[in-house]
Amino acid sequence: MPAEQAENQSQILAGMLDQPGQIHDLVEGSIGWLSSHALQIVVAIAVASVVYLILTLVKHGFTRLRDHARSPTDLTALIGRTASRTTHFFMTMAAARLVVGYANPPDLIYRTIAFLFTVAAVLQGAIWAREFILGLIERRAGEDNDRSQTLANAMGLIRILVTFALFAIAAVMVLDNLGVNVTGLVAGLGIGGIAIGLAAQGIFSDLFAALSIIFDRPFRQGDAIQYDQTVAIVEHIGLKSTRLRSVDGEAKVISNANLLQKEITNYADIARRRYAMPVGVIYQTPPEKAERIPAILREVVESCGGEFQRAGFAGFGASSLDFEVYFYANGPDIDTAIALRHKIGIGILKRFAEEGLEFAYPTQTTFTAAPDGTMIYPFTRPQDAGVTTG
């Protein structure tokens, strides 16, 4: 089709209803074309039917690919799902557009078929894009087995937003092909979208934060998390806020946007916990016994079922020789980890008692001196120190 005809296509189609003479010419031209090109028309219809049949078989093949995929979220299932949404209108217009040139139709019929094919292609592209985008989102969400009500609500909202955006673009493209000046429409939609976004900024902020929680999954429903000084269990992730239950029993409600701005510690994903246990012995401990303390601590940790990391001398305390032992408690269960820490602590207490190692506690020693400054220790009577009383 010449470029000049393509440029005038929308103006001619838009003016058809306003020019009855053109309609009459179309009818007369069509009758004349049918009578003079009967054989070409029959051949074109036959070829178009074959093309339509091939497209139908291809669609059926993609449908089978979707139905026999290993998983509904598999990539092959996504491709099959997208292709299976091909409409009969698009296949019909695609077949007609492929063969229309061989039948030498009147120029107006040619343009009409070309325009209808453009409309069908734009709408079909929007349908394919919608299915592919939603399929990708559902595939990402399907990696999580927690199909909560929040996810269902979010998917419903996402479907509405994606459908509106894609078909709005398709409508603008169709109107542009009809010769409508869409510049003002696009500008109006843009300004309206900005106004709505500014008016509902807080709502949209929490909404997109909820979508981030659902798809990025920093935590899930039932996880124990900590933010600021609060440790709580996630009870429900909503589109506006998240509800939690603190370890003390209080119900906590916090907006999604505010929650994601905080540093969050998720205790549900802990594979093992590391504990540091300080130990202090008295300064009167013989050096040879103090030297054996790291080995003793290691033996205790391993005998109790913990994973030893390291132990050693930490420093000279105010009233003790300080040692530290580090060990791991494997597994996500906090109760098991606390029980192991308790067992190791009692084991150290028993082993130190067997080894004759004495734990230090805060003490103060008072030294006395004679009037001449001579230190007296242990304590003596004043007269033994040469002090005159009376």
Image (cartoon, grey):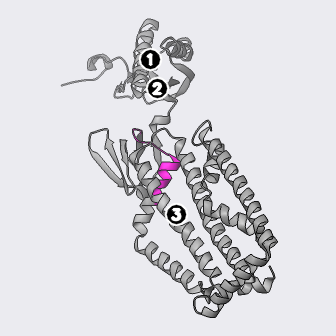
The amino acid marked with disc number 2 is Met
Percent position of residue 256, x then y:
41, 55
| Helix, strand or loop for disc 1 | helix
Expressed as whole percent of the image width and height from the top left, the position of residue 161 reads 49, 64
Image mark for residue 277 = 2
Using a 10 Å C-alpha cutoff, classify the residue at mark 3 as few (fewer than 14 neighbours), some (14 to 19) or many (20 or more): some
Task: Name the image quarter holding the N terminus.
Answer: bottom right
Residue found farthest to the front: 35
**Mark 3 and mark 2: Cα distance apart in space:** 58 Å
Given contact means CB atoms under 8 Å apart, are the residues at marks 3 and 1 in contact?
A: no
- Tell me if I can see residue 325 in this picture: no
Magenta segment = 208-223
Q: Position of residue 300 (x, y in %)?
A: 49, 13
Say if mark 1 contacts mark 2, CB within 8 Å: yes
Where is residue 25? Give x, y as percent: 68, 89
Q: What residue occupies the far top of the structure in this picture?
A: 354
Q: Residue at x 56, y 14 (%)?
A: 295
Q: Residue 344's mark?
A: 1
Residue at numbered disc 3: 163
